[in-house]
Image: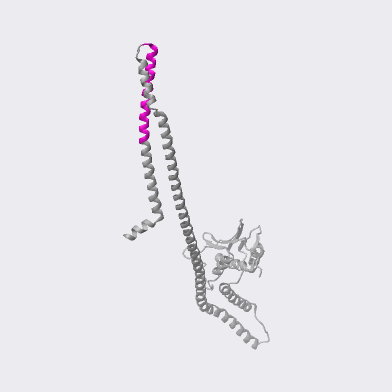
């Protein structure tokens, strides 16, 4: 209890409030005193007014001659007024009292102002201390946030690496199985050719045998390319390129029947991107489109030149992607094809995101949409 009283007593804010209350009570006492004195002075002034009124009344009587004793009454009233010169006295006392009150009021205001000034200084000092403490806390929070972001990036990177290693492990088993068949074909063709060459003087392969080997080699090459694109992420080599030229390079690689019609855009767009990687993306999308229409139908490539982005759409007239698997088409190792690795569209997504863009797919009709930013800088590699 003693400690609480001491704290209250020593608190500058409590002392200031007590002084203020004391000064206010003192001012109220002075006001009451002044009001009492004013009431007394007003009573005296009323008395003088009554005397003046009587004086004027007696003067009127004297002038009219109605009352011969008015002269004596007037002299009595004059003596009464002269004996009580209250007006001068009241004015003097009021002036002194008002001056005294004003002086004391000014002193009170000065004290209050000084108290407020002192409290303001104390509050400003506390505010500065609090702001300094907040700034230090914010700095600590910023450092902790930066550390958490770095840690999150590192953990995300390790998680992605772990997922890739897991995918590579699964892919290795699948790739070994997928490559065994074309290698068996090539081995068989070579053995048949060796046998024929031993039995005759004709050395060489027939056109059918060569086609068989080419298809087998092509299958192995495509699978190996898909694996390399997915596993080995290389830095972008960005230059200013013509999008129509890149589309043309992809179209030149595909073999299509006369029943397939491919519509390409009329207007070209030139901007900065990695031409080799975007060509890989277009190769995959065009290959998927050809397989979707089963060598009979129509493929349309559209290019929209926006203010900050370039949008490329690849649409085919096929049956489309089933609704129950459309959300999985960009996942690594997901495929509905017997001969596919499941890495083609996953690699496309990785390449487009490396450019800072996005790739999406929708059904009915089947349309793959690529969005690439125009603001990439030319690489110095």
Residue situated furthest top in the rendering: 65
Residue at 57% of width from left, 73% of height from top?
Answer: 226
Q: Quadrant of the N terminus?
A: bottom left
Asked if 71 appears above or below 95 in the picture, the reply is above
Above or below for 199 versus 209: below
Residue 268 located left or right of residue 358: right
Q: Measuring from the top left, give residue 307's x and y in whole percent.
A: 61, 55
> Is 26 in front, or is 319?
26
Q: Quadrant of residue 188?
A: bottom right
- Its colouring scheme is one colour
Please report the residue visible at 38 percent of the width from the left and 45 percent of the height from the top. Answer: 24
Range covered by the magenta-colored residues: 36-65
Asked if one can make out residue 89 in the rendered structure from this viewpoint, the answer is yes
Where residue 187 sits in the image (x, y, percent)? 59, 83
Q: Where residue 250 appears, x then y in whole percent?
A: 63, 67
| Position of residue 5 measured from the top left corner of the image (x, y, whole percent) | 34, 57
- Give residue 105's quadrant in the image: top left
Along the horizontal axis of the image, is 252 left or right of 367? right
- Say whether residue 335 is visible: no
In the figure, residue 95 lies in which quadrant?
Answer: top left
Find out whether residue 53 is within the magenta segment. Answer: yes
Q: Nearer the viewer, residue 149 or 321?
A: 149
């Amino acid at each position: 209890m003693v400690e609480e009283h001491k704290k209250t007593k020593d608190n500058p804010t409590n002392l200031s409030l007590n002084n203020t209350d004391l000064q206010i009570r003192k001012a109220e006492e002075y006001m009451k005193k002044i009001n009492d004195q004013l009431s007394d002075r007003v009573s005296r002034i009323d008395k003088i007014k009554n005397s003046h009124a009587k004086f004027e009344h007696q003067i009127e009587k004297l002038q009219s001659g109605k009352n011969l004793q008015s002269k004596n009454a007037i002299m009595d009233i004059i003596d009464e007024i002269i004996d009580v010169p209250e007006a001068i006295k009241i004015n003097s006392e009021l002036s002194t009292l008002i001056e005294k009150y004003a002086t004391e009021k000014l002193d009170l205001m000065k004290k209050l102002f000084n108290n407020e000034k002192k409290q303001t200084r104390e509050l400003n000092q506390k505010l500065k201390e609090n702001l300094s403490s907040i700034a230090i806390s914010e700095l600590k929070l910023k450092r902790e946030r930066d550390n958490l972001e770095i840690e999150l990036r590192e953990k995300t990177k390790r998680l992605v690496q772990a997922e890739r290693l897991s995918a590579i492990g699964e892919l290795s088993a699948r790739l070994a199985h997928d490559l065994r068949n074309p290698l068996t074909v090539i081995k068989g063709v070579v053995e048949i050719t060796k046998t024929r060459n031993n039995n005759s003087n004709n050395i060489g392969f027939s056109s059918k045998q060569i086609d068989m080997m080419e298809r087998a080699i092509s299958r192995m090459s495509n699978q190996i390319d898909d694996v390399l694109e997915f596993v080995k992420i290389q830095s972008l080599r960005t230059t200013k390129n013509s999008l129509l030229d890149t589309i043309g390079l992809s179209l030149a690689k595909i073999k299509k029947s006369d029943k397939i019609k491919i519509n390409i855009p009329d207007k070209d767009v030139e901007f900065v991107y990695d031409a080799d990687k975007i060509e890989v993306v277009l190769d995959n999308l065009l290959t998927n489109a050809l397989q979707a229409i089963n060598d009979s139908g129509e493929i349309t490539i559209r290019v929209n030149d926006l203010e900050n982005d370039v949008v490329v759409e690849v649409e085919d007239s096929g049956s489309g992607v089933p609704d129950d698997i459309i959300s999985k088409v960009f996942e690594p190792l997901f495929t509905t094809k017997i001969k596919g690795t499941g890495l083609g569209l996953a690699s496309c997504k990785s390449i487009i995101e490396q450019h800072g863009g996005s790739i999406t797919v929708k059904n009915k009709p089947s349309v793959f949409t690529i969005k690439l930013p125009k603001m990439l800088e030319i690489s110095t590699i």
